[in-house]
Amino acid sequence: MSTIVTSKAQCRDCYKCIRNCPVKAIGLKDGQAWVVEEKCILCGKCIVVCPQQAKATASEQAVVEKFLADGERVVVSLAPSYLATAFFSSPWKLVAALKALGVFRVEETLLGAKLVAAEYGRVFREHRQGTMITSCCPVAVQIIEKYYPDLLPNLPGVVSPMVAHGRLIKARWGQDTKVVFVGPCFAKKSERAATKGASAIDAVLTFEELKTLFTAQQINPEGLADQLPAESVPRLRTFPLKQGTLKAAGIDDHLSADVISVCGVQECMETFAALKKGEIRPQVIEALACRGGCINGPAMDQNLTLPARRARLFALAAVVTEQGEGGKGHHIDFIGIRKDNSNSEFNKREDTH
Amino acid sequence: MIITVCIGSGCHVKGSRKIIAQLQQLIAEENLACDLELEACFCQGRCTEGVVIRVDSEIITDVSTENVEAIIRSRLPNRKKS
């Protein structure tokens, strides 16, 4: 699992990270604060609050640079939060810069989200008993794995949109395609490392790492002409918001006991505890670790406030992407989105993919 | 909202492709890409009632280029024109 490490040189023993860790996963080693891997849920709060920027995850910039230098076919899976970033004057500069790097194709991760959300919708409609906890957020899954393992059967047993998209890309463009996910989340790095066998995702970069990569490769996104991703699902562009997963799954959130949407690590833990105790019995819980959804992820830029980011997403969401550039690759009827080794209570079907 | 238009032989002959083109134009002109997703499907088994479309889970028959726009507009979520 990818850990959050402390830079001994930068750390000034202020203990701000220890005070802000929602699961008390930071301990002391030689007087400096170190993350305890077994307890850490990778929410990234410590990385964000450290005034010395002494905390980080291992950078995967070199991994991606090597793919490009080796002439590998690289397809980028771009997290939908990119529409809410303000690193550059527009997200189309970010896409243009990716193409300038030599990336073969840029697709929005929503292609994977579409498959996963369809499955959530099916479970919601067909399994009237039992509570389903959505599993798109790797931090929410970590919270359950480490602190509420009794609730593991409540996860629907499908991979995340990122992994589903990775599998789709490799099926369409070749198994030796290198898939690089770019998003606002540190926890996605550990999700990648956890998949067994042939990995669907070859590298995970945060938006910040990507910005550093552009600079290192001497690419100035502002000087490039706008480019759009090759493929997306505009209807699902609200996915990275609170209630976005529910909407994508066709689940109406009209204020009822059956549907719960919860954001924030403490809020998720509070809800999971209540579920475990039997205090609540909803049909579905949308669980997101970041207040407001993924557009408020720890690796998003802070140039805009959260409300401004949300508005920006809506403003840009209707832009239709291009479908050109080599068409759609190999035709695929379906791809397997089941999670290996899942004891989900919702997996009891004969026709598993 | 997912609009699925049947492109099986019966509906094809009754102009389903023209309906698809019309909807694509509507989506482009009115910036509806976030609300409407357009897909195609094969024969739904209602060939005498062509053209057949589905809006989410609702099946609508006897669709034509004349009435499709009204059918879709009546089902669009209310939006403030921006």
Image (cartoon, rainbow, N blue to C red):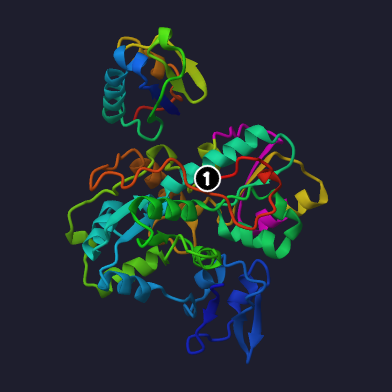
Quarter occupied by the N terminus of chain A: bottom right
- Label 1 sits on residue: A116
Name which residue lies at 29% across and 49% down.
Answer: A229
Q: Are there few (<14), some (14-19), or many (20+) residues within 10 Å of tag 1?
A: many
Q: Nearer the viewer, residue A267 or B1?
A: B1
Residue B69, percent from left and from top: 34, 16
Asked if residue A113 is positioned above or below residue B12 in the image, the reply reads: below
What's under tag 1, amino acid-wise?
Answer: Val
Residue A153, percent from left and from top: 71, 51
Residue range highlighted in magenta: A250-271
Residue A274, percent from left and from top: 77, 50
The answer to whether residue A243 is left or right of residue B38 is right
* Label 1 SS: helix
The answer to whether residue A44 is left or right of residue A97 is right
Q: Mark 1 lies on which chain?
A: A
Q: Is residue A268 magenta?
A: yes
Asked if residue B13 is positioned above or below residue A106 in the image, the reply reads: above
Where is residue A352, by image quadrant? Answer: top right
Q: Nearer the viewer, residue A298 or A153?
A: A153
